Image: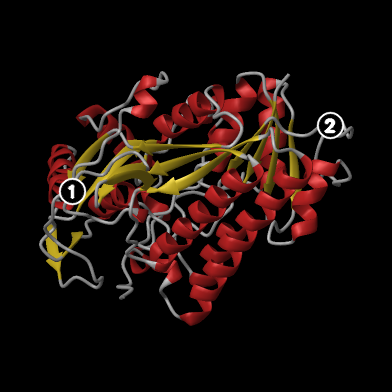
């Protein structure tokens, strides 16, 4: 049976990924240090509903499915922790079978500070972002080099690494002809935040490891994710993933729907022409799984643009206000002075065919999907704290 190691397994995407692979019969180990939960508490941000701790989550999963997900609560910025996960002398925080599962065939790397606004609150949060994200990736790269170059690393990147160039965004690579000669390079990156800059550095680190030590890496350039429910979270109410609705950790579609439910204006920064690629949380699970089944060869780096469709902020606001008004919410849209340094109107045309070619079936932001998210947010509307919805972080 294939062993999958998920780094950052308590997060918005990490926890659903763990259940998804476990449900398919994989041996799953997850590692987390509760960074996101602690950051939410420190910054007084909002969670839509209470979420059991990771130990209770895996116990609930086992009660419902009979399947074991092993848990390690540790800080992966410590290089010795990652090395123990490969050497076999790690101490599990929770498990049923204490025997070492073995070197993982696949590692899925979510273990990063995931927020652009967080990275630019001040110099302290910038330092945390840089220290955590780069150390964890570097520690992982060296563990792979020293113990298992054959292990397939799936790193979750972000479309924000590319910025908004005035040319089509290819899937990771671009061929350039200069003075009569041609070569292929990583597609140019121009991040708009410190968080996104660390993701570029991650890619550079791993590309070095691929070229130098023949590592096998897939880089999934993911757009903003929306949604709550997956097939696994529906098994038990207590298995839901973390849902943030604030501007620090909340993604835009989730945030807009929450704003609509509580009567807060949908907050559009500037003109609202900012366009990005989006995907449903269920598609994240598909993409990671299909990537695991199509690993690169030794010494290869696969890069996929992980989105399903593109929207401007204005288009999203209009779609969500339409559904919100149908559901008797009096939805207002408000354009604010943009607190961010970014283009508000621009060309944006990413290629995203690679994941479809390996079997991913995209979901789309239909009215029914938006209605489903509204239903969950409405159910927990009494938990929403209006004072944390918008704080106006600037950069």
Where is residue 159 drawn, in percent x and y? Answer: 35, 48
Q: Nearer the viewer, residue 70 or 132?
A: 132
Q: How is the image coloured?
A: secondary structure
Q: Nearer the viewer, residue 155 or 391?
A: 155
**Residue at the extreme bottom:** 123
Measured along the vertical axis of the image, is residue 218 above or below residue 208?
above
In terms of image quadrants, where is residue 25? top right
Residue 8: tell me if it is visible. Answer: no
Residue beneath the point at 33% across and 47% down: 254
- Mark 1 packing: few (<14 Cα in 10 Å), some, or many (20+)? few
Residue 28's tag is none
Residue beneath the point at 55% across and 27% down: 295
**Residue at the extreme front:** 180
Q: Earlier in the sequence, mark 2 or mark 1?
A: 2
Kindly state the secondary structure of the residue where label 2 is placed: loop
Point out the image quarter for the C terminus.
Answer: bottom left
Left or right: 152, with 245 as reference point: right
In terms of image quadrants, where is residue 15? top right
Point out the image quarter for the N terminus.
Answer: top right
- Mark 2 packing: few (<14 Cα in 10 Å), some, or many (20+)? few
Query: Which residue is disc 1 drawn over?
Result: 167
Measured along the vertical axis of the image, is residue 212 above or below residue 41?
above
Residue beneath the point at 34% across and 49% down: 187
In terms of image quadrants, where is residue 74? bottom right
Residue 96's tag is 2
Residue depth check, mark 2 versus mark 1: number of the one nearer the observer: 1
Residue 157: tell me if it is visible. Answer: yes
């Amino acid at each position: 049976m294939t062993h999958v190691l998920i780094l950052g397994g308590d997060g918005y995407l990490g926890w659903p990924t763990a259940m998804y692979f476990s449900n398919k019969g994989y041996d799953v180990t997850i590692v987390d240090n509760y960074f996101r939960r602690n950051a939410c508490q420190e910054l007084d941000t909002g969670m839509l509903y209470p979420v059991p701790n990771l130990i209770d989550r895996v116990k609930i999963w086992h009660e419902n499915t009979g399947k074991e997900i092993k848990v390690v609560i540790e800080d992966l910025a410590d290089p010795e922790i990652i090395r123990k996960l490969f050497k076999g002398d790690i101490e599990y925080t929770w498990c049923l079978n204490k025997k070492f599962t073995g070197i993982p065939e696949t590692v899925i790397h979510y273990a990063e500070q995931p927020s652009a606004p967080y990275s630019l609150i001040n110099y302290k949060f910038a330092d945390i972002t840089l220290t955590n994200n780069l150390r964890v990736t570097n520690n992982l790269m060296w563990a792979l080099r020293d113990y298992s170059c054959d292990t397939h690393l799936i790193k979750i990147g972000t479309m924000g690494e590319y910025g908004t160039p005035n040319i089509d965004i290819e899937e990771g690579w671009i061929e350039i002809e200069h003075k009569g000669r041609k070569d292929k390079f990583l597609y140019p990156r121009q991040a708009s935040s410190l968080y996104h800059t660390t993701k570029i550095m991650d890619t550079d680190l791993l590309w070095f490891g691929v070229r130098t030590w023949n590592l096998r890496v897939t880089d999934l350039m993911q757009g903003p994710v929306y949604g709550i429910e997956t097939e696994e979270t529906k098994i038990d109410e207590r298995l839901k993933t973390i849902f943030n609705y604030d501007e620090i950790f909340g993604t835009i579609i989730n945030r807009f729907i929450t704003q609509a439910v509580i009567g807060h204006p949908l907050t559009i920064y500037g003109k609202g022409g900012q366009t990005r690629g989006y995907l449903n949380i269920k598609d994240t699970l598909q993409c990671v799984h299909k990537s695991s089944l199509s690993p690169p060869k030794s010494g290869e780096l696969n890069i996929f643009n992980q989105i399903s469709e593109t929207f401007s902020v204005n288009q999203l606001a209009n779609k969500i206000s339409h559904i919100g008004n149908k559901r008797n919410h009096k939805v207002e849209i408000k354009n604010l002075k943009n607190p961010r340094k970014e283009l508000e109107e621009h060309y944006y045309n990413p290629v995203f065919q690679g994941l479809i070619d390996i079997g991913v079936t995209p979901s789309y932001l239909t009215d029914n999907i938006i209605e489903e998210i509204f239903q969950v947010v409405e159910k927990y509307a009494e938990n929403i704290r209006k004072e944390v919805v918008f704080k106006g972080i600037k950069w």
